[in-house]
Each structure stands twice: as structure tokens, then as C-alpha cells.
Image (cartoon, rainbow, N blue to C red):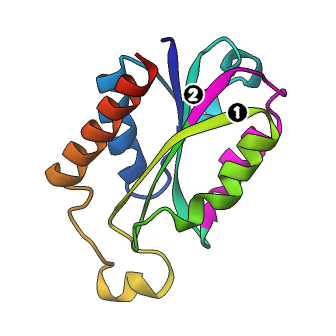
Amino acid sequence: MKTLIVYLSYHHQNTEKIAKVVAEELEADLVPVNQAQADTVTTYDLIGFGSGIYGMKFHKTIMKFAEALPVVTEKQAFVFSTSGRGGTKHHAAFKELLESRGFAIVGEFSCKAWDTVGPLRLVGGINKGRPNEEDLEHARVFARGLKEKSA
């Protein structure tokens, strides 16, 4: 299955760390969102989209990229994120956007990450050192699960 991962990693390269291990596991092409082309995405079977969570949602840059995607059929997507809190509850709006473009969401992943945004900066942030090796291993397991689903 031809796989692409489009991601945005803004502050501490937290999301990039996850993107790299998932891409390695899936043997996927890995492209930062500012280098991605909407028409190229449609040449892949499975597309992953990753971002840090900013203001309880995916970064506006990757949201705008997804809004510009052509409507597709029979394309699978997965989403992943990093944030100070972790968890997938802030994926909903992005998943809805992808579904409105015709993508079938086949998985999602999130982990805690070093966060120094806003007042957290005053105390050195939270989750320093994350994503850690355990988080990266969880991302690898997630990617293996995606491979099993598509086999």
C-alpha cells in the first residue's frame, strides 16, 4: 500500500518524532505540510496527517491544507497528534474535515509531548522529554496495526 504522511511540527519537533517512526514502520513517504502538494496526495492509498494540538485543534496550516484537498474516493487516512495533554478528543474537527473530502478514517494516535506554550513557558513547560522512547514504541505499534488492517 502506497503511503504518505503529511505533518506539521512547530515548536519542539514533537510531532515530527512520531511522524518519523510511523513513516519508517509503514515505509511511507514523509513530507512536511509546507512542502506537500494537494494533487500529489491523491496518488497514495493511505495518507497520514499529523500535527501538534494548538488551541484544542490541529494547527491552522494543516487544516488549510486539508481544506484544499480534492474530493477523493477509496482513500484511507489516519490522524495523529502530540500535545501537552495527550488524547484524541481534539481530532474530531480534523477527522470531520477529511471525511467531508471523501477520506475513510482508519485510525488515530496521540501522545503527550513537551509543551511550553503560553504560561507553561514560565515554569519550563510540561512533559519535558516527551515523546519518549515508550511513546515512540506506542506509535510503532499503532503503525503496525494500520499495516495489519490494510493487509
- Judged left or right of residue 74, residue 1 is left
Residue 56 found in image quarter = bottom right
In the image, 10: left or right of 71?
Answer: left
Q: Which residue is mark 2?
A: 47
- Quarter holding the C terminus is top left
Magenta residues, as a range? Answer: 57-77
Query: Relative to 20, is 30 above or below?
Result: above
Q: Secondary structure at mark 1?
A: strand
Give whichever of 115, 145 is nearer the camera. Answer: 145
What secondary structure is found at the residue carrying circle 2? strand
The Cα atoms of the two marked residues, 1 and 2, are separated by: 9 Å
- As shown in the figure, which amino acid type bears the numbered disc 2? Ile
Q: What mark, if any, has residue 103 been given in the picture?
A: 1
Outermost left residue? 133
Q: Is residue 44 above or below residue 127?
A: above
Say if mark 1 contacts mark 2, CB within 8 Å: yes
Please indicate whether residue 37 sits to the left or right of residue 15 in the image.
Answer: right
Q: Quadrant of residue 130?
A: bottom left
| Mark 2 neighbour density, 10 Å: few (under 14) some (14–19) many (20 or more) | many
Q: Is residue 118 magenta?
A: no
Residue 73 on the magenta segment = yes
